[in-house]
Image (cartoon, helix red, strand yellow):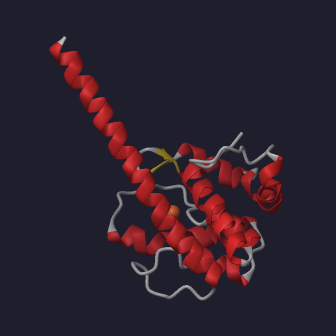
Amino acid sequence: MSRAIGSRYTVESSPQISGYHDAVKDVIASDEVLKLKDFTHHHCMTRFQHCLNVSYYSYLTCRRLGLNAEQAARAGLLHDLYEDCPKCTRKHLVDHPEKALENALESFKLTKVEQDIIVKHMWPIRKGLPKYPESVVVMLTDKYIALIEFCIYLKQSARSLRAKRAASRA
Ligand SMILES: [Fe+2]
Ligand SMILES: [Fe+2]
């Protein structure tokens, strides 16, 4: 069962968000996306969890704004579809959207909007303005989610540091 951080609902079984699951069920169950569970992302979670977080909250935002929430959800799940996890260099930050798009196109038929969402999600680090409102939503959601994930990492690090200090005093 999968659940976006902060959500009360599991995406596979909750009737409250069945629209989300209907939109992504083939993508979220694919080997390519499930493989992302093997990679750490932003130090504190898997890349699968990060993509699910971005996809789910982009879906809710686009639905609220009357945009194409289904395409945002699908592309959100695929926006970081790459296996290797090199050091977070500027080159990696600039190059990985194209790698993710290339990988996604090998397995899925994507609309123009979905392709734009994936390849533009690193704006402004990667040049090329998002062309569609759904691309802007996913680009902003990715940054917001990354910030939350980094705060989770800081919290986990502080907790383990406190535990180490307490153990060394005992
Ligand atoms: Fe990314
Ligand atoms: Fe991302």
Q: Nearer the viewer, residue 131 or 126?
A: 131
- Residue 31 position (above or below residue 141): above
The quadrant in which the C terminus is found is top left
The image quadrant of residue 9 is top right
Residue depicted at 39% across the width and 78% down the height: 125
- Residue 42 position (above or below residue 79): above
Residue depicted at 64% across the width and 69% down the height: 61
- Residue 139 position (above or below residue 131): above
Q: Which residue lies furthest to the top in this view?
A: 170
Q: Residue furthest front?
A: 64
- Where residue 163 appears, as percent x and y from the top left, is 28, 24
- Where residue 16 appears, as percent x and y from the top left, is 79, 51
Q: Can residue 170 be seen in this view?
A: yes
The quadrant in which the N terminus is found is top right
The reply, left or right, for residue 101 in relation to residue 161 is right
- Residue 97 position (above or below residue 80): below
Q: Is residue 105 visible?
A: no
Residue depicted at 62% across the width and 72% down the height: 102
The reply, left or right, for residue 30 in relation to residue 78 is right
The image quadrant of residue 60 is bottom right
- Where residue 121 appears, as percent x and y from the top left, is 52, 74
- Where residue 157 appears, as percent x and y from the top left, is 31, 38
